[in-house]
Every structure is written in structure tokens, then in C-alpha cells.
Image (cartoon, rainbow, N blue to C red):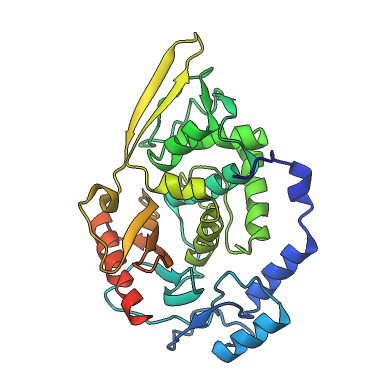
């Protein structure tokens, strides 16, 4: 786990190479990605250039882009399927950097709580698990109707690790605000700095205004950008451990010094056993999110029997049941991509 603390000036001075990377992504230069493509509608924005596996090899030789990500031209969907009715869907073989399914992956979508993975990435990069956070008034007063809360009170003292589990496993919006304030001083500054981090990893279709994913018309991303964020997170072993968590007890002390705790149980149906991924896959874990405008959204990390990694995304399904059904259907494309 990266132990350096957040440096605002460091983010504000993003190296020019990051900007160049983003520009090249937008121009559709491919690197490190093998795709099998079919035509798509004219409503999608076309890249200036198209690429196949031959172009991929030449791009890699020229070193235009990182070789450990899959870059897909905006002009192409991959293996579109009428059974997948969500607004956007993506399946990446993250071991071989191969796109197995891609549908509207550059369309702007509301991510709901799935955007908490970006807050998690900032936490892994710029905070320490054993840092102590004092809950502020703002973090203890998230007033959005229906917002899921861990129930922290102003003055509570809790570790970054417990906040992270509270945010990712329990989906506590108050935990997300507390982490944002710990890293950047305020949630507003955190959102601005997180957006700069998104540019640095090539997620140029993303704009966040908060740490939690509570709805705002200016808080949006794309299926492809979520893949990029998740790809970065999977570099942290502690994140992989977090994803597999089914039960956790967060502990803290209140303003009077009394011990408090919250027992957290995962509702992920793949982890609880109520859903099974199609063979040969095992779901390691993921993050879901739902709002009225975002619909049902999900990003997942899976492995096959050869320990190959897969990242899959569904955005704006019309229900939770439909989301998981479509996810399983899309995962069947792993067999076709062998």
C-alpha cells in the first residue's frame, strides 16, 4: 500500500505525459488491446483512426500508451448482444488486455455508488490505513433522502481502514465524505483533486462533484473510465482483500471516548452464494450502486481457473435483478474469448 500522503501541488502539476496520454486515448490510438469488432450506430463519436491487432503491435512498439491497459476505439462496439439492455456494458480480460464485450462504453452515465471506487483509489494512494480521522459536522450530516449511512457522529475518531470498509462494503456515504475530508480538507477540494487524478490515469470522460456518488447532474463517468479506475485499484493487494470481505466490524471511539462499532455484512449475491457466475469464473468482488437516474450499476472483478483477471461493468440496468442477469450473460463471453 502506498504510504505517501496527499500532495495538492503534486496533483495540480500533473506531468505533461499524462495530458499526452489522455489526448492519445481520445484520438483512438490503440495499445495493449486485442479486439474483435462489429459495426455500430453512427451516433457514437468516431476516433480519427481505427486499429486492429496489427495496429496494436505497431502502437506498442512506438510506445504511445501504457502496455498494461486495453484501449478501445470509440467507433466500435464489440460483440453486441440484444440480451444486454443496459445503457453501457464492458468486459475486459485484464490479464491479456483484451476486450471481450463493449457496448456504449464511452457514453456519459451516472455511476451512483460505483463512483466510490474512485474515492477508494484516492484513499489507497494518499492515505494510510492506520491514520485516525475525526468525523466532521459535514460527514455526520449527510441529509440526502435514502442515503445509506454508517451513523457516525461529529467528533467520532475512526481509522482510515474502517472508513474504507464502511464505504466499500456497507456503502456508507458518511464514510466517503470523511475520507474525502481527511485527504483533501473538504469534499469540494477532494472532488477537484480526484478529477485531476482521473485525467492522470486517462479517464477523460469522467467528472465527479462528490466522494459518494449521490446524484448530481454534473457527476458522471463512462464504463471505460470505470474500468481504468478499477484496473488501477487491482494493483493494491489490500483492495483485493477488501473486495472479498463478507463480514467486517468497524470500530471507533465517540467524542466522549466510548467504544462504538458497526457490524457490516456484504449484500453482494456472488459472495453470499445467492448468485453464481458462469463457469469457469469466480467472482472476487465488486461495487454496486443504484439511484433513480443512474439505474442499477455494477463493476466486478472475477478470475478464471487459470487465475486470469476480468473486469466487468454494467451501467443503467432497469433493476437489480436485471443487472445481475445481464452481468452473468455478458460473462459468458469469457468462453468465447479463449
Residue 333 percent coordinates (x, y): 33, 76
Q: Nearer the viewer, residue 38 or 45?
A: 38
Q: Residue at x 35, y 51 (%)?
A: 292
Q: Nearer the viewer, residue 284 or 294?
A: 284
Q: Residue furthest left?
A: 274
Q: Residue at x 64, y 73 (%)?
A: 25
Residue 95 percent coordinates (x, y): 48, 69
Residue 313 percent coordinates (x, y): 41, 63
For the question of whether residue 45 can be seen, the reply is yes
Lateral position of residue 77 relative to residue 193, left or right: left
- Vertical position of residue 334 compared to residue 8: above or below: below
Q: How many marks?
A: 0
Q: Residue furthest bottom?
A: 54
Q: Residue at x 28, y 53 (%)?
A: 270
Quadrant (top left, top right, bottom left, bottom right) of the N terminus: top right
Q: Residue furthest top?
A: 256
Lateral position of residue 308 relative to residue 32, left or right: left
For the question of whether residue 296 can be seen, the reply is no
Quadrant (top left, top right, bottom left, bottom right) of the C terminus: bottom left
- Vertical position of residue 313 compared to residue 337: above or below: above
Lateral position of residue 324 relative to residue 147, left or right: left
Q: Residue furthest front?
A: 306
Lateral position of residue 26 relative to residue 291, left or right: right
- Vertical position of residue 36 compared to residue 85: above or below: below
Residue 19 percent coordinates (x, y): 73, 65
Q: Nearer the viewer, residue 329 or 323?
A: 329
Amino acid at each position: 500500500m502506498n504510504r505517501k500522503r496527499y500532495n495538492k501541488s503534486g496533483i495540480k502539476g500533473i506531468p505533461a505525459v499524462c495530458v499526452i496520454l489522455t489526448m492519445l486515448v481520445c484520438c483512438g490510438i490503440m495499445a495493449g488491446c486485442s479486439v474483435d469488432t462489429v459495426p455500430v450506430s453512427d451516433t457514437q463519436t468516431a476516433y480519427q483512426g481505427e486499429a486492429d491487432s496489427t495496429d496494436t503491435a505497431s502502437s506498442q512498439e512506438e510506445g504511445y500508451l501504457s502496455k498494461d491497459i486495453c484501449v478501445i476505439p470509440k467507433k466500435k462496439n464489440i460483440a453486441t448482444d440484444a440480451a444486454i439492455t443496459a445503457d453501457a456494458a464492458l468486459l475486459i480480460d485484464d490479464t491479456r488486455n483484451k476486450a471481450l464485450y463493449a457496448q456504449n462504453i464511452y457514453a456519459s452515465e451516472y455511476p451512483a455508488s460505483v463512483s466510490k471506487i474512485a474515492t477508494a483509489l484516492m484513499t489507497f494512494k494518499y492515505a494510510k490505513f492506520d491514520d485516525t480521522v475525526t468525523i466532521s459536522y459535514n460527514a455526520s450530516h449527510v441529509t440526502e433522502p435514502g442515503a445509506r449511512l454508517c451513523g457516525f457522529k461529529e467528533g467520532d475518531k475512526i481509522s482510515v481502514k474502517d472508513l474504507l470498509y464502511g464505504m466499500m462494503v456497507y456503502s456508507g456515504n458518511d464514510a466517503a465524505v470523511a475520507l474525502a475530508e481527511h485527504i483533501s480538507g473538504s469534499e469540494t477540494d477532494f472532488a477537484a483533486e480526484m478529477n485531476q487524478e482521473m485525467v492522470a490515469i486517462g479517464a477523460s470522460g469522467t467528472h465527479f462533484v462528490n466522494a459518494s456518488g449521490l446524484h448530481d447532474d454534473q457527476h458522471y463517468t463512462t464504463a471505460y473510465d470505470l474500468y481504468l479506475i478499477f484496473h488501477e485499484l487491482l494493483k493494491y493487494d489490500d483492495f483485493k482483500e477488501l473486495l472479498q470481505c463478507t463480514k467486517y466490524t468497524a470500530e471507533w471511539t465517540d467524542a466522549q471516548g466510548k467504544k462504538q462499532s458497526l457490524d457490516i455484512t456484504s449484500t453482494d449475491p456472488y459472495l453470499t452464494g445467492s448468485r453464481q457466475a458462469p463457469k469457469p469464473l469466480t467472482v472476487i468482488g465488486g461495487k454496486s450502486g443504484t439511484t433513480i437516474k443512474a439505474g442499477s450499476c455494477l463493476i466486478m472483478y472475477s478470475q478464471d481457473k487459470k487465475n486470469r483477471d476480468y473486469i466487468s461493468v454494467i451501467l443503467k440496468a432497469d433493476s437489480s435483478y436485471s443487472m445481475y442477469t445481464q452481468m452473468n450473460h455478458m460473462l459468458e463471453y469469457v468462453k468465447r474469448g479463449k
